[in-house]
Structure formats: structure tokens, C-alpha cells
Amino acid sequence: AWIFHMLRYLFQSSSMGSEERFQVFVKELVSTYSGKLITTADLQLAAEKHLTKGMDLEGNRKLDWFFEEWVYDTGIPTYRLSYSLVPLQEGKVVVKGKILQEDVSENFTMPIEVFAHFPGEKVVKVGRVDVSGKETSFRLTVGSKPLKVSLDDNHQILCTNKPL
């Protein structure tokens, strides 16, 4: 279930949040394999037919990175976020941060959404960071100073988030 949940997350259009591509993938999968056995390799090939640019982290039109980490390996990542806020002109703010990744192999890669929390319980996705290795730095600009910044508020990734 988590594999499909994370594939759904990866299929979503970063600009529109659309699930259309994931729905087409699932319908095609059900149509092709209805009443038949499906292997993990079959599942990967079916997903790769609908690959988005954001999913192609290795630039080879394959999901080897995803299946090697989430299907064939056993690690579940722990993420730790540290950040600072740098004010810009016109009230904008740069979120300058780093994400530490633990409890998985050094080559483990996963895109993670970054959220900003504002007064009135308003939470806004401000970007996505392709986390790879033990530490990944990022810079994102937001329209105003957030109360805090966090990772994976939509719980799209099987992981643990801990404070730094």
C-alpha cells in the first residue's frame, strides 16, 4: 500500500497537484493484468510508461532509484530539517536549509515537499527538494516570514521526521 501511496505522490504534477496521470497508470495496470499475475518488474515497467519529469531523478526514463530503495531494500529514512530565514525586500523571505537523511544507504534519494506555516494555521507547500545522500542543502523563497518550516506535512513518504 505504501508503494502505491508514494507512487501516487510522485505522479502528481508539481504545478497542478493533479492525480490524472496516476489514475491513468492504475487503470492501465488493472486492464493489462486483470486476472493475471503481475511481477514487481511488470509494475515498474507500467509505471515508467507514465513517468513524469519530476520522477526521472536519474535522467534515464526509469524508476530504478525508486524500486531499488522502496521495494528491494529495507531502509526507512529519517529526516532532520534545519533552516534559517533570510529577509529580502518587499517582505519576501528566503528559507535557507539543509535536510539530513539517516537510516538508509548513502545513495538513497527521495523528493520531499517543504511546507511553510503562517499565522492562522495556514500551511503552504513552498517547494520540493530532491534529497540525496546524508545531507542536502536548499534555498526556497516565500512571500512572507513563516512561523516555522517543515517536511512532508501531507505524509506522502514512509519516513520519520525528527527535529535537529
Image (cartoon, grey):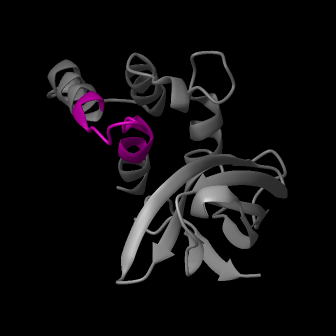
Which of the two residues, 119 or 77, is positioned nearer the viewer here? 119
Using the image as rendered, state which of residue 122 and residue 59 is in the foreground: 122
Q: Which residues are magenta?
A: 7-21
Residue 13 magenta-highlighted: yes
Q: Is residue 113 left or right of residue 129?
A: left
Percent x, y for residue 22?
29, 34
Name, please, the residue furthest toward the front. Answer: 90
Q: State the count of labels.
A: 0
User: Residue at image x 43%, y 59%?
Assistant: 156
Q: Does residue 21 appear in this view?
A: yes
Closest to the observer, 71 or 103 = 103
User: Residue drawn at (80%, 53%), measured in percent from left and top?
Assistant: 136
Q: Quadrant of the C terminus?
A: bottom right
Residue 155 appearing in the image? no
- Locate the N terminus and report the quarter of the image it occupies: bottom left
| Left or right relative to 12: residue 32 | left
Residue at the spot 80% in from the left edge and 44% down from the top edge: 107
Q: Is residue 3 left or right of residue 91?
A: left
Against 130, residue 82 (above or below) is below
Q: Position of residue 138 (x, y in %)?
A: 75, 52
| Vertical position of residue 86 compared to residue 23: above or below | below
Viewer-nearest residue: 63 or 162 = 162
Above or below, 130 against 150 in this view is above
Q: Residue at x 70, y 59 (%)?
A: 88
> Percent x, y for residue 25?
28, 27
In the rendered view, does 112 fall on the left or right side of 43? right
Q: Estimate the x, y position of residue 95 in percent, counting from the top left.
A: 69, 62
